[in-house]
Image: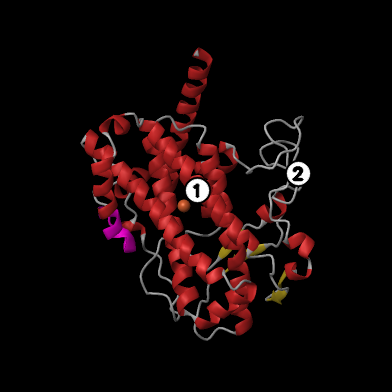
Amino acid sequence: MLTNSTNRRRFLRQGTTFGLGAALVAAGASRATAQIPDSDLALVTDGDIAILQFLAAAEALENDLWQQYTELSQGNVAYQQSLERIDQSLIAYINQDRRDELSHNVLINAVLESIGQLRGKSLTVDVSSFMVVPPPNVTGIAQTPRITNLQTLNVDTSWFNRYRSAQNPDLPPAPGATAQFVTITGQPTIPLSNGESAASIQLSAHCAAFHFAAIEQGGASLYNGLLDAMISPLARAIVASIGPTEVYHFVAFHKSLENLPAFSANGLSFPGIRQNPTLGQAIMPAPCTFIDATLPLCSVIRPRSDANSGPLAAASGLAASGLFAGNPGFVSAAVDLATAAETAITKQTAQLRAFAASI
Ligand SMILES: [Fe+2]
């Protein structure tokens, strides 16, 4: 088994080729090199770099899973039809999300490359050696090894309840704030074989519809919290601008559940959100506790604390969901990058507080 340090070297090795984005990374890197003033690049701290490297890896894994969903939603008719029974727009939303996550990864890596050029070392994040998970042998998906595994997932649905409640996981007490809307454990979110029954594929589509929003609400919380730690204007601009697009994605997929039909199979039951418009249409973030429980309730992204949604929480939560089943090397490397990002967050948050106190 590879050690963390070995994995980190693999992650951060020279080169930026990964899957379908290789050409785009190269193109993006030269544009960034030409246009970002050295004076801006020089202000990026080592801590900012550590956080951006974690985000580059996070965006790469997002791109990897959205790529699989795109291929199957466009190339597997039974899966496509199952998704369209939930929301006709899902196929387009999935493809647009894949495009966006890839663009996030490419941009962050291009900026890292520019910073690295100024410092005489490679800082880009390369995930190509972690593409080791074989996808299911089913119509519509290329038989290319992937980073992520969509075949046995514990899909978090607690966000559905959380955004309809006044409870904020960052503030005690929050009884029930983590209650699952539907308990989805060990389920595929994609078809696993060409002989699968229609009911089984529909079950995967229902699980996937919640997985789409689960991934994006996690990204929304992650970026939001990281804003507290970024120091350089360049790194702040990246986190401040990509973060809201994760929110944008979350909202689109959240709304796609508004007409979810009731469905039961294999012992798993989804309530008919379609039959309950009061529940389904409650997609705006209900005002919740924020900053301090004594303050008036406020409509905000939650959680945003480092403990609940920071890099380590995100990496370990995704690993616990089964998303990297069969890919222990990626888990190890991601946790290593997340740990470096956490060190940076602790240091830079303290520096910013000290700076504010000194003014
Ligand atoms: Fe993203």
Furthest toward the top, the residue is 358
Residue depicted at x 69% and y 49%: 285
Q: Earlier in the sequence, mark 1 or mark 2?
A: 2
Residue depicted at x 29% and y 51%: 28
Q: Which residues are magenta?
A: 17-26
Is 22 one of the magenta-colored residues?
Answer: yes
Give percent across and percent down for residue 158.
68, 54
Give percent across and percent down for residue 312.
51, 42
- The crowding category of the residue bearing disc 2, from other C-alpha atoms within 10 Å (few below 14, some 14 to 19, many at least 20), is some
Q: Is residue 326 visible?
A: no
Q: Which mark is residue 166?
A: 2
Secondary element at image label 1: helix
Label 1 with label 2: CB-CB less than 8 Å: no
Secondary element at image label 2: loop
Q: Which mark is residue 315?
A: 1
Residue 143 falls in image quadrant: bottom left
Residue 50 in the image: above or below residue 129:
above
Q: Nearer the viewer, residue 339 or 27?
A: 27
